[in-house]
Amino acid sequence: MAEPMKIRATMEGDAANIKVLMNHVMETGQRKDAKTGQLIPAHFIQTVSAHVNGKPVLEAQWSQAVSKNPFLGFKVKGAKAGDKVTVSWADNKGEKNSADAVVA
Amino acid sequence: MNAKRRTFLKSAGAASTVAVAVAAGLIKPTSVMAAEWNKPAFDAKGMPDALKALGSVGAADSKDILIKAPDIAENGAVVPVEVTSKIAGTSSIVVMVEKNANPLTADFNLMNGAEGYVSTRIKMGQTSNVRVVVKAGAKSYTAVKEVKVTIGGCGG
């Protein structure tokens, strides 16, 4: 599941606009397997956190109702070009991923 | 052998003391692990329960919360939602789908210069109101937008 994440951070006025695409199935636990008729167990990202230069800016908790391959966009005031943005997530099965980008 | 047995008994005793304290409500598990996933709120089945679990009962309607979402979503599995809060001191933005089995969808906590803005994509089982609750200071504010769904995004 350690597929790459995509992060893009660009300055818009005095704020950095940060966009993140994560690779995740985001299984709800309500869907049935077409062949076996068994419920597919839930598998989704539960926590997401974002840091700018090591300082936390966003901490999110998600349910299974966030779409597959989730998109997250947010803005941080006071960030500057060259700042390092780190975004990481953890899911309900204990899988984790993290990626970073430099504000352009 | 005997010494190991003693330490084992001791540590087992200590562990159960904590368990007893938790059970008695002396230590709230949530306060021990602040960043832990808020299971009771996410498991809540209806809007009133979900709002209660979040501690946002009685949020005031606000026109300073803008929800950008399609009026009609062709595919309920991917509904783009963009929330902008113009309320000063916005510290948290919560997105809920009133008619989903578990309404609470996403809870964003903002700090250290993060603006009152989040953008994401959510799943909707059927046509429903998308409700946003914003916390600023000690107060909660709310706004809704209806999204009509032609193909549901939950279930197979």
Image (cartoon, coloured by chain):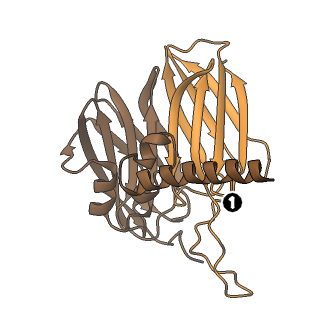
Q: Is residue B81 visible?
A: yes
In x, y percent, where is residue B125? 46, 70
> Which chain is assigned brown?
B
**Residue type, numbered disc 1:** Val
> Which chain is assigned orange?
A
Q: Is residue A55 left or right of residue A4?
A: left
In x, y percent, where is residue B14? 55, 48
> Judging from the image, what secondary structure is the residue with disc 1 in?
loop
In this rendering, the answer to whether A104 lies above or below A32 is: above
Q: Which residue is painted at 62% across and 20% down in the image?
A: A54
- For the C terminus of chain A, the quadrant is top right
Q: Which residue is painted at 68% across and 57% down in the image?
A: A93
In x, y percent, where is residue A27? 63, 65
Give the residue at mark 1: A25
In x, y percent, where is residue B133? 32, 45
In this rendering, the answer to whether A84 lies above or below B59 is: above
Q: Is residue B54 left or right of residue B126?
A: left
Q: Quadrant of residue B46?
A: bottom left
Q: Label 1 neighbourhood size at 10 Å, few (<14), some (14-19), many (20+)?
A: some
Q: Is residue B104 visible?
A: no
